């Protein structure tokens, strides 16, 4: 009788803490032993010369979600999770998105109905709160937080989603009371709307003007305002998809003040620039997202933020809208304006290989930083640790085996999503996840999906401090009375 169901042998295993040579023993989908020369497994994988890393956690992706403008994402829970698995990701945290007038409970049920029969890897949900009514804040949200939906995104822009400052304060006060984490899309709505109107009046309709309308200063102002509101309520906050210097400086300032401000960035801010939105014809639409890619100097700021710990999370913000087709970027033909183009770019499958190649491969990031940014810290911040996001005894055997030497030229034809383009077409990278295991089962191998539709399980997120160490109150503010208890 074998001691283990599976042993991954002879690899270099890395966590957010260190990289060591170790075998991994797996039983019933969990890691049960780590060490040198483990006893035999019923199945053995030889990882000689390979890196053995925790499977990635993509904690910001839009799957089977209707955008604020009514566009449906190309990926459903099957194609999205298949694509994630082939890129070394073993857990996704997409959004259950409330549109105005909807009951949050019903929204969550609808997303479960979509995900349950289709997801091929495990998943949790963030909520999107666009309608913080008394019913939502007083009843639905507290109950949902206790049921394992412990983080929610709010928007400071988009007509159909944006909250005003007073609503944001209400949401933050509730998050503080219930121990939830608020994620913020920080762009100043009126600045964007005003600039957009001016541009359109002058006939500036092409995709590149999206980058002008979504000015870095609009992102900076909203980032600062969001931080200020979080400081007032004395609550942690995570600023999502940060694009460059202006916002980074605000985040750094807040972190230096000791505020619990966390930050996320994404591949598009390292690999794309505003020039990519100025490609011939309407092709620039393929690189349109919000906030938009900036310039080379801003890319460098984002890199430095990853290196120096300003960013805790690297996710894809996978928002897949096909170029062609009824909901695509070309929806109204090339005569459309940048205002009508669905915002977002795909990235579930390429998030890890892109960061690995340009970060670990160049020496800008070490392996432990790579693991922390892409798996361990998202697991901690969102309450999935230590079951997910690390290689440890008792953790789920969610593992990606990497060939650091494998060279790949990216093309859409090799990817497993439902898209008709990748903004990274033709990019040559080194380092690729050659095998992905989810709870000990091989779900992807050498670019081929090996998993099954519907095998993914829903994960409840935990708000206990052991699972999610978000730190303590900084100022002692009491949002119920508006007074400070200490400090
Ligand atoms: O352009 C983007 N980022 N689209 C996805 C929606 C969002 O705001 O994250
Ligand atoms: Zn956003
Ligand atoms: Zn997003």
Image (cartoon, rainbow, N blue to C red):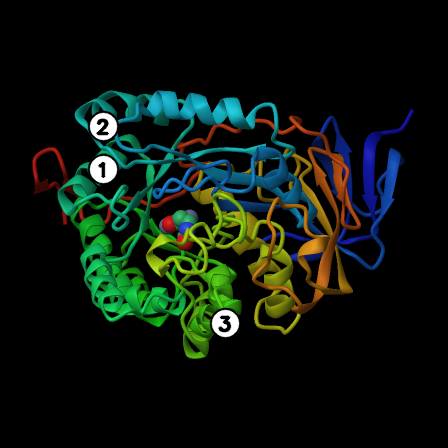
Q: Residue furthest bottom?
A: 297
**How far is mark 2 from mark 1, CA to CA?**
7 Å
Instruction: Identify whether 341 is placed above or below 214.
Output: above
Instruction: Identify whether 188 is placed above or below 181.
Output: below
Say if mark 2 contacts mark 1, CB within 8 Å: yes
Residue located beneath label 2 in the image: 137
Q: Residues within 10 Å of mark 3 (few under 14, many from 20)?
A: some
Q: Nearer the viewer, mark 3 or mark 2?
A: 3
Q: Nearer the viewer, mark 1 or mark 3?
A: 3
> Going from the N terminus, do you reach mark 2 or mark 1 first?
2
Q: Secondary structure at mark 2?
A: helix
| Residue 190 tag number | none
Q: Residue furthest right?
A: 1
Q: Quadrant of residue 421?
A: bottom right
Say if mark 1 contacts mark 3, CB within 8 Å: no
Residue located beneath label 3 in the image: 279
Comparing 106 with 288, the one in front is: 288
Comparing 339 with 267, the one in front is: 339
Q: Residues within 10 Å of mark 2 (few under 14, many from 20)?
A: some
Q: Secondary structure at mark 1?
A: helix
Q: Residue at x 82, y 30 (%)?
A: 5
Instruction: Identify whether 143 is placed above or below 392.
Output: above
Q: Residue at x 67, y 27 (%)?
A: 455
Comparing 61 with 212, the one in front is: 212
Q: Residues within 10 Å of mark 1 (few under 14, many from 20)?
A: many
Whether ligand 1 has any atom under 8 Å from the Cβ at mark 3 is answered as no
Q: Position of residue 136 (x, y in %)?
A: 25, 26
**How far is mark 1 from mark 3, CA to CA?**
40 Å
Residue located beneath label 1 in the image: 171
Q: Quadrant of residue 106?
A: top left
């Amino acid at each position: 009788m074998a001691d283990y169901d599976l042993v991954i042998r002879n690899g270099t295993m890395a966590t957010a803490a260190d990289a060591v040579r170790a075998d991994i023993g797996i039983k019933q989908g969990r890691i049960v032993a780590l060490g040198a020369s483990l006893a035999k497994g019923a199945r053995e994988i030889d990882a000689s010369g390979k890196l053995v890393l925790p499977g990635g956690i993509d904690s910001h992706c839009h799957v089977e979600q209707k955008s604020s403008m009514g566009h449906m994402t190309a990926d459903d829970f099957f194609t999205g999770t298949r694509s994630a698995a082939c890129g070394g990701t073993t857990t996704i945290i997409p959004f259950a998105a409330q549109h105005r007038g909807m009951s949050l409970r019903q929204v969550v049920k609808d997303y479960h109905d979509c995900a349950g029969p289709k997801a091929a890897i495990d998943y949790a949900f963030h909520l999107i709160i666009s309608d913080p009514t008394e019913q939502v804040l007083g009843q639905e949200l507290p109950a949902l937080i206790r049921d394992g939906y412990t983080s929610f995104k709010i928007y400071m822009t988009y007509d159909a989603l944006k909250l005003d400052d007073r609503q944001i304060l209400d949401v933050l006060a509730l998050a503080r009371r219930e121990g939830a984490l608020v994620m913020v899309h920080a762009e100043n709505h009126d600045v964007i709307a005003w600039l957009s109107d001016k541009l359109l009046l002058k006939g500036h309709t092409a995709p590149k003007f999206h980058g002008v309308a979504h000015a870095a200063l609009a992102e900076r102002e909203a980032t600062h305002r969001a931080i200020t509101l979080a400081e007032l309520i004395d609550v942690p906050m995570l600023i999502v998809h940060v694009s460059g210097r202006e916002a980074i400086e605000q985040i750094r300032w807040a972190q230096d003040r000791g505020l619990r401000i966390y930050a996320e960035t994404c591949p598009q801010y390292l690999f794309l620039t505003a020039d990519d939105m100025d490609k011939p014809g309407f092709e620039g639409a393929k690189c349109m997202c919000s906030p938009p890619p900036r310039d080379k100097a801003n890319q460098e700021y984002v890199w430095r933020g990853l290196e120096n710990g300003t960013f805790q999370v690297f996710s894809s913000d996978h928002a897949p809208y096909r170029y062609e087709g009824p909901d695509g970027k070309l929806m109204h033909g090339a005569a459309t304006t940048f205002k009508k183009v669905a915002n977002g770019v795909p990235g579930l499958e390429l998030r890890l290989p892109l960061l690995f190649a340009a970060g670990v491969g160049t020496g800008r990031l070490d392996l432990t930083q790579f693991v922390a940014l892409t798996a361990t810290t998202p697991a901690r911040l969102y309450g999935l640790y230590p079951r997910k996001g690390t290689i440890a005894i008792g953790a789920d055997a969610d593992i990606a085996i990497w060939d650091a030497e494998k060279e790949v030229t990216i093309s859409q034809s090799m990817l497993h999503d439902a898209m008709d383009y990748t903004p990274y077409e033709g990019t040559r990278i080194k380092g690729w996840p050659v095998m992905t295991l989810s709870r000990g089962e091989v779900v992807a191998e050498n670019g081929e999906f090996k998993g099954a539709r519907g095998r993914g399980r829903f994960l409840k997120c935990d708000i206990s401090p052991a699972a999610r160490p978000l730190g303590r109150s900084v100022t002692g503010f009491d949002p119920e009375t508006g007074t400070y208890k200490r400090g």
